[in-house]
Image (cartoon, grey):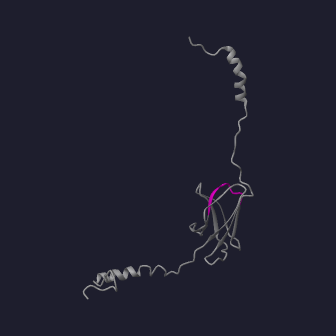
């Protein structure tokens, strides 16, 4: 025969049950961003001169959101305070919102300071791409005329000579 718990057993476990139900629950929340959490960066051109007045966006790579943006000062400096913990990247954006340069990714925790920089690349002259494929065009033209040079050793020779 199977019996359930006796009244005496329930009476003994009642204080334990009440202690478990009324115990405070420890809830932890992520630490709020601290004003001491700082990202400090400089924007330089290709020859290490400060770039002033460009928009620098601080992008959180975990959420893929731009957290903040600001213009660089006369020294090419930007500073973001009170940043949440996470992995970020700094991006220089033009007036249309297109990214023209990026810095290195970095991770920051509450209370830390990260110093970094973004370097803009040198501007290419308008004609820089004009001569990229000249060799391929010359070879293709020569091949079309039957003047392709072939050979495995020594000086290249045209067929038929």
Residue at 69 percent across and 15 percent down: it is 8
When asked about the image quadrant of residue 18, the answer is top right
Q: Residue furthest top?
A: 1
Residue 62 at x, y percent in the picture? 59, 55
Look at the image and give the residue range highlighted in magenta: 81-89
Residue 81 is left or right of residue 156, and the answer is right
As drawn, 71 above or below 46: above
The quarter of the image holding the N terminus is: top right
Residue 136 image-quadrant placement: bottom left
Q: Residue furthest front?
A: 153
Determine if the magenta segment contains residue 155: no
Q: Position of residue 159 (x, y in %)?
A: 26, 85
In the image, residue 100 sits, relative to residue 37, either above or below, namely: below
Q: Identify whether 49 is placed above or below 157.
A: above
Query: Residue 122: x percent and y percent?
Result: 57, 77
Q: Position of residue 93 (x, y in %)?
A: 60, 68
* Rendered residue at 53%/79% (across/down): 124
Q: Residue lying farthest left? A: 160
Q: Nearer the viewer, residue 121 or 114?
A: 114
């Amino acid at each position: 025969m199977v019996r359930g718990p006796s009244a005496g057993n329930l009476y003994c476990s009642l204080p334990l049950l009440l202690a478990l139900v009324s115990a405070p629950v420890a809830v932890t929340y992520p630490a709020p961003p601290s004003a001491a959490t700082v990202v400090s960066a400089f924007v330089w051109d290709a020859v290490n001169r400060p770039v002033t007045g460009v928009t620098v966006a601080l992008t959180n790579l975990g959420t893929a959101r731009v957290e903040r943006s600001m213009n660089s000062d006369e020294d090419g400096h930007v500073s973001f305070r009170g940043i949440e913990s996470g992995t970020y990247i700094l991006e220089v954006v033009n007036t249309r919102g297109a990214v023209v340069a990026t810095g290195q990714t970095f991770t920051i925790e509450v209370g830390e300071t990260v110093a970094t920089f973004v370097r803009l690349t040198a501007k290419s002259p308008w004609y820089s791409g004009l001569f990229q494929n000249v060799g391929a065009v010359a070879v293709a033209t020569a091949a079309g005329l039957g003047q392709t040079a072939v050979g495995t050793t020594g000086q290249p020779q045209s067929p038929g000579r």
